[in-house]
Image: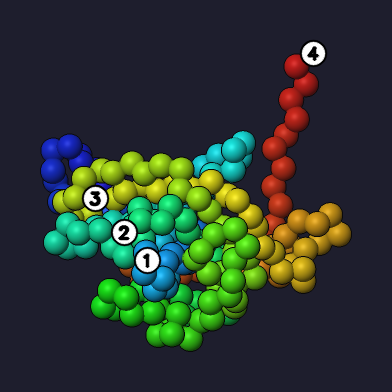
């Protein structure tokens, strides 16, 4: 199979569905934001990762609605400059999926999904109590790729604080992947569980 994307052998939807089938497993960010009037929003994004270590920066990438208007998450981040990312584990997978429902603006996904907001330390958006890992973020910058259907906006956030459940930590104070049991996003409606982590080591090269 060969696809010349520039020659438009597939439309953007076809390219999207093809690519998410092999760009995976993708970590899932369950992003909590708050509107300027104080209403909470909670939404999952699998276009998510850490993109800088110094300074520590994460990226999420919301796509616009079909009419080109921004989704609630992006609207709230632009208004307040803050968001929280909760790690999605197997235990909250169903609730995470429920947060993807297209609820009317202002209706709480926390209530709809059964998840619980908990106070953050440095930002207004809440933590997700049921998630063992939450990170508090300030907006650094956004990069828009347009308002047409399928166009994303990359949202970069500075990590201000990290909340990790003590039971996840190993003797070195790092997260034990056997205990975390994250979910990864695949293509279509497929997900995967992290149940058999293993180590690989980069070989050391003698340059003498």
Looking at the rendered image, the disc whose residue lies closer to the viewer, 2 or 3, is 2
**Outermost residue toward the front?**
37
Left or right: 106 in relation to 116: left
Looking at the rendered image, the disc whose residue lies closer to the viewer, 2 or 4, is 2
- How many numbered dots are placed on residues in this image? 4
Which residue is located at x 65 percent, y 70 percent?
A: 132
State the image coordinates of residue 36 (x, y, percent, origin top left).
37, 64
Among numbered discs 2 and 1, the one appearing first in the sequence: 1
Among numbered discs 2 and 3, the one appearing first in the sequence: 2
Residue with the mark numbered 2: 75
Q: Residues within 10 Å of mark 3 (few under 14, many from 20)?
A: some
Which residue is located at x 70 percent, y 37 percent?
A: 202
Q: Residues within 10 Å of mark 1 (few under 14, many from 20)?
A: many
Residue with the mark numbered 4: 208
**Disc 2, disc 1: CB below 8 Å?**
yes
* Element type where label 1 sits in the image: loop
The one of 132 and 123 positioned closer to us in this rendering = 123
**Disc 3, disc 4: CB below 8 Å?**
no
The one of 123 and 132 positioned closer to us in this rendering = 123
State the image coordinates of residue 30 (x, y, percent, origin top left).
47, 66
Among numbered discs 1 and 3, the one appearing first in the sequence: 1
* Element type where label 4 sits in the image: loop
Residue with the mark numbered 1: 35
């Amino acid at each position: 199979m060969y696809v010349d994307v520039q020659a438009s052998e597939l439309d953007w939807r076809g390219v999207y569905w093809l690519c998410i089938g092999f760009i995976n497993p993708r970590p899932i960010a369950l992003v909590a934001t708050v509107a300027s009037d104080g209403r909470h929003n909670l939404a999952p994004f699998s276009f998510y990762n850490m993109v800088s270590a110094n300074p520590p920066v994460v990226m999420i990438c919301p796509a616009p609605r079909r009419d080109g208007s921004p989704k609630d998450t992006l609207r709230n981040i632009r208004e307040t400059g803050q968001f929280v990312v909760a790690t999605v584990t197997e235990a909250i997978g169903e609730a995470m999926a429920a947060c993807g429902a297209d609820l009317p603006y202002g209706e709480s996904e926390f209530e709809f999904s059964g998840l619980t907001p908990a106070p953050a330390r440095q930002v207004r958006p809440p933590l997700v109590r049921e998630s063992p890992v939450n990170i508090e973020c300030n907006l650094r910058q956004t990069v828009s790729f347009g308002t047409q259907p399928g166009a994303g906006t990359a949202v970069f956030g500075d990590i201000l604080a990290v909340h990790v459940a003590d039971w996840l930590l190993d003797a070195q104070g790092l997260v034990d992947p056997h205990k975390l049991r994250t979910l990864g996003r695949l293509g279509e409606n497929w997900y995967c569980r992290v149940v058999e982590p293993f180590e690989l080591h980069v070989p050391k090269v003698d340059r003498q």
